[in-house]
Image (spheres, rainbow, N blue to C red):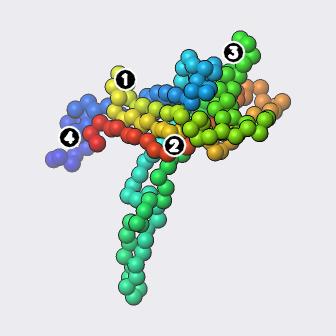
Amino acid sequence: MAGLPHFKNSTAGPAKYEPLYLNQFEVIITPPPAVAGKIGFGNNLMLEHVLNVKNLPEYSGSGSAVVLQNYKFSQRAYAPAKPAQTYHQFTIDFEVNLNNNNDMYIYNALRAWSDLIYDPLTGRQGLKATYAEATIQVTQFNRTGVIYRDFVFGPVFIGPQKMTETALDYTQDNQIYKLTAQFTADMYTESRVGQ
C-alpha cells in the first residue's frame, strides 16, 4: 500500500514540506575599503540590482577527472590525489540604472573595484591586499526568511573575466543594460541546515 500514488502515502505532502524556491536569496557585497564609499556599495543599492547568482559551489566527490588503473582489459577508477582547484569563481548579474545625477552607479562601483587591480586609464596596478580585501555573502532562505544555506566568499576580487560590454543598438527600444561580473574567491565557508 505504501507505494500507491495517493496524497496520504507521501511523506512530504501530509507533512507540508516546503519547496526550495530559487528566488528566495540575498547577496551582500562588502567591497574593499578603497571603494566602499562609492554609490552602490555604501548604501546597499547593489542588493537592489542583483538579478541572479550563477555557479555557486556544488561538489560531487573530487570535482575532477578520475584516475584509472588497468588490469589486462579491465579498469579500476579512483578519485585523484588532489582536487582540480581550490579557489572558486562565480558570477552575479546586475541591472544598471542612472541616478538623478546621471551616474551609472552600479557599473561605476564595480569598475572602481576592477580599477584597483589595473586601471587602464593610468596604468596603475594594485596589490591583492587592496583589491581582494572583500567578502560576498549569498544567503538562501525560505518564504518566511528563515535561512537554510549561507555562503561567505573571501578574500574575493572582481574578475578576471571582463564585465559585460555595453553593446549599443538603435534597433532595440526596450534593451536594459544587464551587467555580468565574475568574482574569484580563494576560499569560502558554507553552512547548511542539516549538514
Q: Name the residue under label 3.
A: 99
- Residue located at (44% from left, 36% from top): 152
Give the residue type at disc 3: Asn
Label 3 to label 1, Cα distance in Å?
30 Å
How far from the left and from the top, in percent, is residue 136? 50, 33
Give the residue type at disc 1: Gly
Mark drawn on residue 9 = 4
* Of the two numbered discs 3 and 4 in the rendering, the one whose residue sits closer to the viewer: 3
* Of the two numbered discs 2 and 3 in the rendering, the one whose residue sits closer to the viewer: 2
In the rendered image, which quarter is residue 18 located in?
top left
- Vertical side of 72 occupied by 58: above or below: above
How far from the left and from the top, in percent, is residue 64? 46, 61
Q: Name the residue under label 1.
A: 145
* Of the two numbered discs 3 and 1 in the rendering, the one whose residue sits closer to the viewer: 3
Comes first in the chain, label 2 or label 1: 1
Label 4 to label 1, Cα distance in Å?
30 Å
Where disc 4 sits, the SS reads helix
For this orientation, the residue located farthest to the left is 1
Comes first in the chain, label 4 or label 2: 4
- Residue located at (35% from left, 22% from top): 144
Label 2 to label 1, Cα distance in Å?
26 Å
Q: Name the residue under label 2.
A: 185
Give the residue type at disc 2: Ala
Comes first in the chain, label 4 or label 1: 4
Visible residue check, residue 122: yes
